[in-house]
Image (cartoon, rainbow, N blue to C red):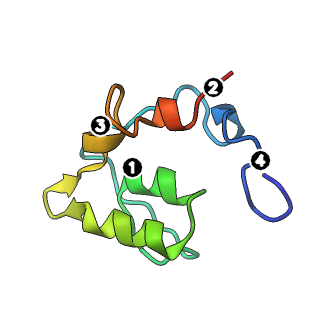
């Protein structure tokens, strides 16, 4: 992390993630307490994203795609999807 709290080289997932934790998580993970974020507690996949994407439009997007049934992140952000994490955060 930089002194400003940004991850720096966003193509290098290991700056924030270890052991492949950048992959979309399976449903049913415990919620995460985020005292600095606008959504608290927050579901696990959303927490992984909002750790770096801290603006209010992203928080709104997160809330709009999270229901009592779970998170819909994988619809657009899983491997092969239009906005796949692996494509948007292209690695070396």
User: Is residue 59 rendered to the left or right of residue 28?
Assistant: right
Q: Which residue is mark 4?
A: 8
Residue sticking out furthest to the left: 69
Point out which mark residue 91 bears. 2
Vertical placement of residue 71 versus 42, above or below: above
- Residue 35: quadrant of the picture: bottom right
Rounded to the nearest whole Å, what is the CA distance between mark 2 and mark 3? 22 Å
Front label number (3 vs 4): 4
Q: Are marks 3 and 4 in contact (CB under 8 Å)?
A: no
Q: Position of residue 74 (x, y in %)?
A: 29, 41
| Numbered disc 3: secondary structure | loop
Q: Quadrant of the C terminus?
A: top right
Rounded to the nearest whole Å, what is the CA distance between mark 2 and mark 4? 13 Å
| Numbered disc 1: secondary structure | helix
Query: Label 2 crowding class (10 Å Cα cut-off): few <14, some 14-19, many 20+?
Result: few
Q: Which residue is mark 1?
A: 45
Which numbered disc flags the more N-terminal residue, 2 or 4? 4
The residue depicted at 34 percent of the width and 37 percent of the height is 82
> Foreground residue, 80 or 54?
80
Residue sticking out furthest to the top: 92
Point out which mark residue 26 bears. 3
Q: Position of residue 37 (x, y in %)?
A: 53, 74
Vertical placement of residue 28 versus 62, above or below: above
Query: Label 1 crowding class (10 Å Cα cut-off): few <14, some 14-19, many 20+?
Result: many
Which numbered disc flags the more N-terminal residue, 2 or 3? 3
Residue 21 appears in the rendering: no
Residue 17 appears in the rendering: yes
Q: Position of residue 60 (x, y in %)?
A: 37, 72
Rounded to the nearest whole Å, what is the CA distance between mark 4 and mark 1? 21 Å
Which numbered disc flags the more N-terminal residue, 1 or 2? 1
User: Is residue 6 rendered to the left or right of residue 41?
Assistant: right
């Amino acid at each position: 992390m930089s002194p400003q709290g940004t991850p720096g080289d966003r193509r290098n997932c290991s700056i924030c993630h270890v052991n492949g934790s950048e992959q979309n998580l399976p449903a049913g993970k415990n919620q995460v307490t985020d005292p600095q974020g606008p959504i608290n507690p927050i579901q696990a996949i959303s927490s992984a994203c909002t750790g770096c994407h801290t603006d209010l439009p992203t928080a709104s997007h997160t809330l709009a795609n999270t229901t009592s049934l779970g998170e819909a992140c994988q619809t657009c952000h899983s491997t092969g999807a239009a906005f796949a994490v692996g494509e948007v955060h292209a690695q070396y």
